[in-house]
Image (cartoon, helix red, strand yellow):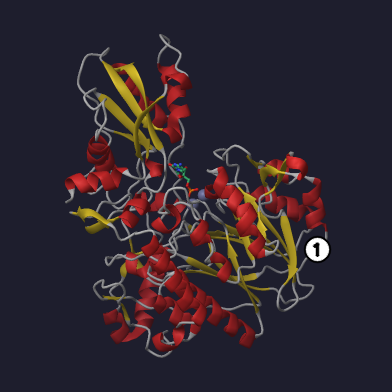
Amino acid sequence: ACPDGEHEHAYERRAEPIVHLTPPSRPLVWGDINIIHTTDSHGWLLGHQKASFPEPSYSGDFGDFASFVAHMKKIAEEKDVDLLLVDSGDLHDGTGLVDGFPPGGIDAHDANKFFDQLPYDVLAIGNHELYIYANALDMHLNFAPKFHGRYLSSNVNITVAGPGGTPVSVPVGSRFAKFKTRKGRKVTSLGVLFDFTGNDHNTTVQKVEDMVNEAWFADAIKEEPDFFLLVGHMPVARDKWPLVFNAVRAVHPTTPILIFGGHSHIRDCLQFDGRSIALESGRYMETVGFLSVNLDHQGSKANLTVNRRYLDPNRVTYEFHSNRRDSSFDSPQGRKITKGLQDLSNRFNLDLKFGTAPQDYTLSRDPFPSNGSLLSLIVDQVLPTALTVNNSRANIPNIIITNSGGLRFDIYAGPFTKNDQLTASPFTDAFQYIPNVPLSVAKSVLPVLNGGGNNGRRELSSAEERYARGDVDERYGNWLAEMHERAGPERRAAQNLTLGYVTQDACPGIGDDTLHTPLPFFPSPGFISSTPPTGSVDTAIDLVFVDFIASEVLKVLNGLQTTKTYTSSDVLSYTSILLNEVLGVFAQVKWN
Ligand SMILES: Nc1ccn([C@@H]2O[C@H](COP(=O)(O)O)[C@@H](O)[C@H]2O)c(=O)n1
Ligand SMILES: [Zn+2]
Ligand SMILES: [Zn+2]
């Protein structure tokens, strides 16, 4: 499959040990319309930098990605087809580049600037652009204008000072966009956010079912384009896409509809009907999605010919698909972006070392609880250590509860830096407490939180559920065997599959671009807590929790007992140390 045999070279950056990457299994299938998709990048613009698999598979940085896109645009011109670039949101929260700014800065302000150096055709807003008003305002004032009407927030508004200082509620970006492709195809595009309710004051998210009844929506979709490009921060399965899809379909029974989703951080694909396709391209720049569609059967109402591929973003992948060698791959713009990102990392001092992690701690590759579980490390060691530093309540027995979704990435053995701290735990959530909670009541809070719905944890994809059940799709096994057979003896010998994504979705054929051995996957509860102290049922303890879950904790406390009605006035500040600082504090104490 490898055109010139040049792609099996090494990943050898940043003084990491040399690691050999497997090239993609086959060339991309191009169509009349081709779309490259990113989503939930969460600041991983410097790529994944650790040496053990699967990380090197995702080692391409945003500069490499920019070079790839530039080459692909050239190939599209040579083939005389369209190539678009889209993003489905969640730019903020996730690495030092977006969270390691000095005090007083604005979250992802500096890192955002790399996005507008790429030729994005459409971008949609994510929920992580809305947790903090200042970030949403930055998107409105500084980010959206760079994309000239193509940064879409169909159902998301922000309140700003209007004429004469009167507050007005306006879309953060634009509600929709209509444009023509290079080949002259007419496109109507929306940018929809799921029914998010955790947004900051002075931002509003309209429910998807209400959005599709708006007059502007009917107007926007009235005229028939060559295809609808629905980009949105909403999982392609189990969410509100059918509402948007059906609203469009009711007016245009056969017009092609291409959907690009996000938010659930998985590789996924499905077709709502034969003339549509919905793709979701993972998270953290661990996946670049590629979708091709053949539209040019004028007048035909036949099923679309569609092809989707989930690329591992690394230079081997990029060079393979753009027919470049290492020496001819980097574009000037790509190099500039890589340098800019490294400069930003240096400016934010992201290599600052807090200590040395003695082993790997993972979020889902080890069961919870276990010695290898990051969640176990957090509740058994990190929080009990870090929260008692300089804390006058250190000697009062406590239970500390947090939501597992607040921890976002594994820790790998070796130097533990400021960037590692912020990838594992990016949120500035504060610790609060309620004093004098009877031990028996406090002990019951965690089980009720975990029994009471799915808050705090993201849903498992159907593939993850199947993996957790040990149920591996035989389609993949057969295909893998066939690829091995076709590969020939030399390649077969070289193909010791690395750990990585093994995707099972609902679209035809196999989506993964590079073959992998699947990563172990263990589900974890939505909420986790430190071990409760011993004592009698009425021992008064501090119930400590992150502010992100304060309202849920109050609700549970009031459901568990009737002696006292707990309100937000019972909630006090526990420490000045934030959730995104606890690992650094712990590492300095225990890993030095
Ligand atoms: N302050 C915060 C904000 C978010 N979370 C967690 O992130 C989840 C949403 O992340 P997506 O990338 O999937 O949009 C949310 O459900 C929380 O679990 C948090 O813990 N603290
Ligand atoms: Zn996300
Ligand atoms: Zn999200």
Residue at 46% of width from left, 37% of height from top? Answer: 454
- Left or right of residue 48: residue 237: right
Q: Secondary structure at mark 1?
A: loop
- x and y percentages locating residue 166 in the rendered image: 74, 39
Query: How many marks do you count on the picture?
Result: 1
- x and y percentages locating residue 142 in the rendered image: 61, 57
- Left or right of residue 411: residue 309: right
Is any atom of residue 303 visible in this view? yes
Residue at 45% of width from left, 75% of height from top? Answer: 64
Residue at 45% of width from left, 88% of height from top? Answer: 328
- Left or right of residue 71: residue 247: right
Above/below status of 252 relative to 65: above
Q: Which amino acid type corresponds to the residue marked 1 in the rendered image?
A: Glu
The residue closer to the viewer here, 448 or 99, is 99
Quadrant holding the N terminus: bottom left
Above/below status of 221 relative to 551: below
